[in-house]
Image (tube, rainbow, N blue to C red):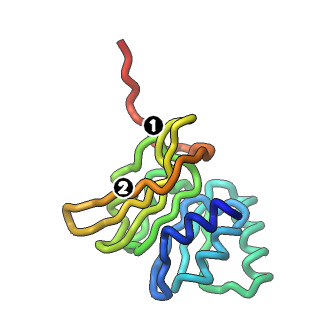
Amino acid sequence: PKMEARLLQALSVNPNDRVLEIGTGSGYLTALLAKMANNVDSVDIFEDLVTAAKAKLKALGISNVSLEVGDAAQGWNRQTEYDVIVITGSLSVLPEHIKQQIDEGGCILAVVGEGPVMQAQLINHVSAAEWYTEVLFETWLPPLINAPRSKRFCL
């Protein structure tokens, strides 16, 4: 819960925000995001995690969440842009597909890097051609399944 609290504090989710969460997991962070945002679309590659999260959110009376089973490592193919995207597994590099899904003025929260050197980053979409990345802290997370890998340098 401590890491989630630090991440949510950095995000500053607004009551009108549309949020995409990539990696539902237990649904804990999903529930916290739902209490802060207008609506949350959350996707996980594991059907059993989505099923369990649905039951937990229903028991909590949270109704502004859409949970789906799927692989969103390359982005979530919806015809919508989001104000906030939260990625709960690490990425060696942030895919352009995901960046294209964020509204101008929005932000992406991701852990980027390759173990053991990873950083929690807040990536802000300032304008059509401008992005600003703020490094929040160093951490480690398991990689997002099927996430693109950065090219390795070999001699």
User: Label 1's element?
Assistant: loop
Give percent across and percent down for residue 37. Answer: 53, 82
Q: Is residue 36 above or below residue 29?
A: below
Quadrant of the frame with the N terminus: bottom right
Q: Amino acid at mark 2?
A: His
Give percent across and percent down for residue 98. Answer: 40, 58
Q: Is residue 154 visible?
A: yes
Give percent across and percent down for residue 104. Answer: 29, 72
Quadrant of the frame with the C terminus: top left
- 140 vs 122, left or right, is right
Q: Which residue is mark 1?
A: 149
Is there CB contact under 8 Å for labels 2 and 1?
no
- 75 vs 4, left or right, is left
The residue carrying pointer 1 sits among few (fewer than 14), some (14 to 19) or many (20 or more) residues within 10 Å by Cα, namely some
Instruction: Name the residue at 60% across, 80% down.
Output: 34
Q: Residue 97 is drawn in which quadrant? A: bottom left
Is tag 2's residue or tag 1's residue first in the polypeptide sequence? 2
Instruction: Name the residue at 41% across, 73% down.
Output: 82
Cα separation, mark 2 vs mark 1, equals 14 Å
Q: Nearer the viewer, residue 81 or 89?
A: 89
Give percent across and percent down for residue 26. Answer: 73, 63
User: Label 2's element?
Assistant: helix
Q: Nearer the viewer, residue 77 or 12?
A: 12
Q: Which residue is mark 2?
A: 97
